[in-house]
Structures are given as structure tokens and as C-alpha cells.
Amino acid sequence: MGGKKVGAPENLIIGNKRLDDRTPEDFRPMEMSVGILKHAIGSATFNFGNTRALAGVFGPRAFHPKFLQDPQKAVLRLKYAMAPFSTLDRSRPGHSRRSMEISKVATDALASVVFVEDYPRTGIDVFVEILQADASTRCAGINAASLALADAGVPMRNLITSCSVGKIDGILVLDIGGLEDNFGEVDMAVSMIADQDKFVHLQMDGIVTKEEWGQLLTMAREGCGEIYKKMAAALRERYATTMEGV
Amino acid sequence: MLQQWKVFDMAKTENYIKKLIETNLRIDGRAFDQFRQTQIETDFIGTAEGSARVLIGNTQVIAGVKMDVIEPYPDTPNEGSLVVDCELVPLASPEFEPGPPNEEAVEIARVVDRGIRESHCIDFEKLCITPGELAWTVHIDVHIIDHDGNLIDAAALAAISALLTARIPKLDTNNKPVRVMSKEGQALLPMRDKPVEITIGKINSTFLVDGNLDEETAFDARLTLAVNSAGNLCAAQKGGKGWFTTDELLKAADIAIEKAEELRKLLPKGV
Amino acid sequence: MEQTELVKKEKELVVPGDVIARGLEYLPGAGCYRYENEVRSKLLGLVRLKDRFLSVVPLAGVYIPKAGDGIIAVVEDLQSTFWILDINSPYDAILQLGEAVGEFVDITKTDISVYYDIGDVIYTKILNVSRSKSVQLTMNDYRAKKLVGGRIMKITPSKVPRLIGKEGSMIELIKNKTGCLIVVGQNGVVWLKGECEGFAAKAILMIEAEAHTEGLTDRVTAMLEKGVE
């Protein structure tokens, strides 16, 4: 396996406590808000602890160039980008191969639920910007995108929920954060349809046995179920009647 | 039987494939868990440190390994490094256009990279020449030259085959690699594992391995799993707009582990 | 087991994927879809039930053109025999010369911009919408006309019914209190003309922001009465 990387902490987990005091099954504190931008038709933020993602939706709108239009459905495009100040060492602005790949898998995840057939010849653009990165950025981004699409009135079969799971010091954990991402053994990001047993996105790095594979999938599924409840509540909150009898 | 087929538009390939699947047939008569004829030819390109040409059915991929001496990354001063690139060469398919790598090329490169990197098959510490100053970087370029589906598996097979037969160039007195075609006296790149990637396609609830170009148009979703020699998974990537249930993912793991073992037998011996 | 059950109430807020009803008796209308024996919401919006049809009225979203709708459109471009108009939708609309002008026009002698030019605002009716959403307009309707002067504002199309009110009550309220001419298009475009344009606009924006709440009519009345003094 080779020696420890420079800067690796002695232990990532001691007993039942991770470096930030969480147990293996705990999420970092999640925060989300919907409809916070003025110009995007729909928008939302989603945070996992220090990881903060912002998403904005434009569309359905006219899609150009014309030869790329689909006469039978809308073309959904999610573009994922990390702000240069989102990482402790400034990262270069613009695309990277990593952001291209994440854009692709995230687009596919959301396209599984959007009723693109309802808007032929149009384009629906979702822009995800990572404002602060502390691991699991694509998961936060996908959750923000899902909320933003609902906020925009884009018809969907359901919400998409996303979270990460992994293995640190041999223990399977939920919601990979910061150092756990750099120095852990396994990192898996998944997205699912609401709280159902349907994986629409899955990426994994690291060595797992077949048994661990199954355990991680179950842990991820339960995590997404928890996130679904919170996301549905956040959407309802957006329109909570606060003007009663003013 | 015929009544169900009325629903499908015979002219569309995708629908035709789906119709066949319902009758337990594949368009080229293979079993659902059968690969097309697979051939691996190594030492294909003399100017590369290592190379391989892989054919899976009509899909053809060439991978070349080039090595160079660079300063190691600051957080790994005792280690060499790996970079994987993939090019969808325009002559491989009318769908490929010249230009910088698009999202498909980038995905293939990154999925192949992860299968190799996460299996720890390259001992990066052995690539260190002078700690903190000089180390070997291994650059794998995968060129798709004929596209008939299953590009990821073919690319991964070509990459690992090229690595297993790659030879480290000699260094001159200035620690620069001596560039010659002859591999005489050069040591093989030390490799510790032989990861194989298997992509499984899902059509309704049927799983297929090694989808050809036509079959891929009918895939609801696909899952690529990288399997190491011990039969453990070291990387996973789901693609497509469909979904997998937990049971399906477990079943896919079983299929991938079995198929990877079969393909591994075709790989060159290495060190 | 095959029980029919209404899970959500009328005017209840639902999110995409929420089950609104179970059983085959209820039918999915706009904003809903059927999944096995359930009717589910496609949108973040409010449930509506009419006869056996369930629908969800979105709280945001673009205008999807529908035949028969009266809309406000702006001329974007014109060719020798038709105009292309912006209808506040991802789809443009076409107005053919024959649907705009009753008399015979010799196009070799006349440039059709004499009728409607780029930038003109018209109240028009959607004649038909094809499956790929090609939209044809017509001026062959008693309400259709060019809207001259004044200003245009846009609101979320799904809130237009609230702005109009039951039998036009809400919009009449604003017109009376502000003395403005107001024309509301189903596509969310509103045309205003009069001395109190800004004030009327304020009322309209208030309705848009609170369309999903109760007691809105009273609050709007109160706001208008206070302001006009």
C-alpha cells in the first residue's frame, strides 16, 4: 500500500469518533435554502458542513445552435464548476477534466427524472458552483441542483438526493469530509431517486470486498432517505404561509 | 408474441435490440454474459516504453506508455506519478470530431486511470529516482481507433497490457532518459496487480456484458467495475440516464468479478 | 387493496414526486403523472381537484403556449408575409399576414411593417400549437389589437388566474383604484397604461409574490386604498 501520505493524521477514527466528533453514521450538519437568487428561474444552496454548493436554473429556454436541438425533448445540461477560492490552495478557474466528468454524471443523474419530453426543442441549463469545498462537493452540488430545478417549476418525477460514503481506517462511514477524503481508503458518491432503491449516479475509488460493496450501498441508500426528508421540507418551507392576517 | 412487438418501431435500432432481448437474443447471437473475441498484442509501438493493441470484436484501441523524469509532487516527494489520457480519434467513428477531449473522452480516461491507480498496481515508490527531486512519471495515452462499443473495457485492457510490458528507459549522466527504440537492457516496469475493468449494460432488467455499438444505444444504464486479482472491487462508475437497484448492483459485482478473472488470463505476464 | 384514496387536499402544497392520490379513479391532469396506481405531482405547487382530474398549479415556471390563450406578444422580426413574435416562452410564435389583416395586401407593393413593426406590442390569440410546439397566432378575435404606449411587465404565468381573480374581480379592483388601462395575457405579460402605472405595477407584484396565500384580496384592497390617498 505504500507509506502514509505527507500530512496524514495518525488516525482518522478512534473508537467511534471521527476527527470532527461524528460517529460513523452521522452526517455533517446540513443546511439548505431555496429561491435565493433573483435572476435564475430557480435556485438553491446546499451545505454538508463546510462544503457549500449553489445552483441556479435557466430554462426551459430557446436552445441554440438549432442543429443541436432535440425536436422531441428539452436538452438538459448541468455545468459543475469550483470557484477558485473554494479550496485552501487557490484552484485555477475554468474547466478541468474533473469538472467535465462531474458535469456529465450529474447531468445524467438529473435527466433520469426531469420530464424533458414536456419541452421539445428547448434547453434547460443548471449551473452548479461550489463556493467552499470540504469533500463531497459533487453530492452537495447535485442536491442543490435538484432543489433549484423544483424551485424553477421544471417538472420532475421526483427529487434526486445525493451523499457520499466510504472507508476510513477500515471503518465504513457516511458523509466523507475533508481529511477523510484525502487520507481515507475508499470514497463513494451516489445519487438516488428520492428515498427509493434506485441509484442514478455512482462513483467509487478504493478497494472493497463484495461484502463491503453491499454495506456501503445500504448505508448510502439510508443516507439519501434522510436527505430526501430534509429537501422536501425545505421546498415546502419556501412557500410557508407567513402572511396570515397581516 | 407478435402482438407485443407491434409496439416497437422496427426501423429504430434501439427498439430492435430491446425486442430481441425480450426473446433472450443478442443481435450477434452471443450469450448475455459473453465477450466478443478479444485479442491483445503487446510491444506494438516501438517508440513507446510500453504499448498494446486490443481488439474486442471490431472495437480497436491502442495504448502507449511514455515515461519521463520530473520533480515529484510536493505532497508525495518519494513517489512517481501517473497520467492517463484518452483520445477518440476521428477515424474511429463518424461521431468523433477533431478537437480537445470532450466529456466522453475525459470520462474514459478518468475511469481507466482510477482502475489502475486504486488497485495500487504501480508501486510509485519504486519510481522514485532521488527523493524530493526526481521521479518517473508514467503517461498512458489511449487511442480509440475503431468504435464498436465497450470502449472503457478495451481502453482499460490496453492500458494495463501496455503497463505490464513497459520498460524503464536508461538514464544518462544528466538524469535524462535515453531515447532509443531498442529495449535492450531495460528493466520491466514493476507491477503489483492486474486490474481489469468490466462494463455491464442494463436493458430493462437484463444485464449484458461487452455491449457493441448498437447495443449501447439501447442501454438504460451502465456500470463499470474495476476488479483486482484478489477479486475485490477497486473502482466503480455508473453511466447513462437509467438507474440500478441495490440488488442489481450486487448482481453486477458478481458478474464483473467473474468476467474480470476470465479476461485477466489474456493479459501479458509482466514481472 | 385497490382502494381509492385522496392523499393530499385541494390547495395543499406538494413537491415533485409527492403522491396525491391512490387508485385509478382519480386522473392525472396538468402537473401530474401516473405511476402504477398512484397519481403523483410533477411540480412544486398547489393541488387542484376538478371532477376526477387532479392537477398541480406550479408556483414558478415558463409559459407553455396553449391554443385559445389570449396573450400579449412583442414583434421580434418580420418577413414578407409573416411576423415572428416573442411570447414570453421558450417558443417563438408566427403571425401570418392572412391572420392579421382582413383585406387583400399586395406584398410586392407593401412592406408589412406598416401594420406591425419590430417592437410593437399586440394582444393576440393563439390559433394553434403543433406537437413540436410551433405556435401560430391570429388577430381574428374581438379582443385582439395593438397596444400603444404604456409599459409591459412580466409575472409568473401560473399566477395569472390569481391576478385576474374570480370573474375578473381582482384585476377590476386594481383598474378601478388606479384608473389605469390594464391588459393581462395568459402568458404572464401584463400591459399597463395610465398615470398610476407604477402603483398598479406594485399591486401586481404583490399579488404575484403572495398568490399562494389566503386573504390576498383584502390585503390588496387595503394597500390600494392607502396608496391612492
Image (spheres, rainbow, N blue to C red):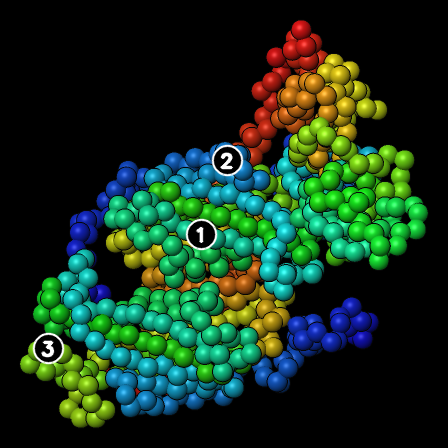
Q: Are marks 1 and 2 on the same chain?
A: yes
Q: Amino acid at mark 2?
A: Leu
Q: Are marks 1 and 3 on the same chain?
A: no
Q: Secondary structure at mark 2?
A: loop
Q: Is residue B6 visible?
A: yes
- Give the answer, above or below, for where B87 lies relative to C50: below
Residue A97, by quadrant, is: bottom left
Asked if the residue at tag 2 contacts the one at tag 1, i.e. Cβ–Cβ closer than 8 Å, the answer is no
Which label was assigned to residue B175?
3
Q: Position of residue C39 (x, y in %)?
A: 72, 44
Query: Residue shown at 53%/34% (left/top)?
Result: A38
Q: Is residue C199 left or right of residue A227?
A: right
- Residue drawn at (92%, 51%) of the image: C104
C163 in relation to A117, above or below: above
Q: CA distance from mark 1 to mark 3?
A: 41 Å
B84 versus A224 height, above or below: below
Looking at the image, do the residues carrying marks 1 and 3 touch, with CB atoms under 8 Å apart? no
Instruction: Say which residue label 1 marks.
Output: A80
* CA distance for labels 2 and 3: 56 Å
- Observer-nearest residue: A116 or A161? A116
Chain ID at mark 2 = A
Does the image show residue C215?
no
- Percent x, y for residue C26? 79, 41
Residue at the farthest right position: C103
**Image position, residue B223 (x, y; %):** 49, 66
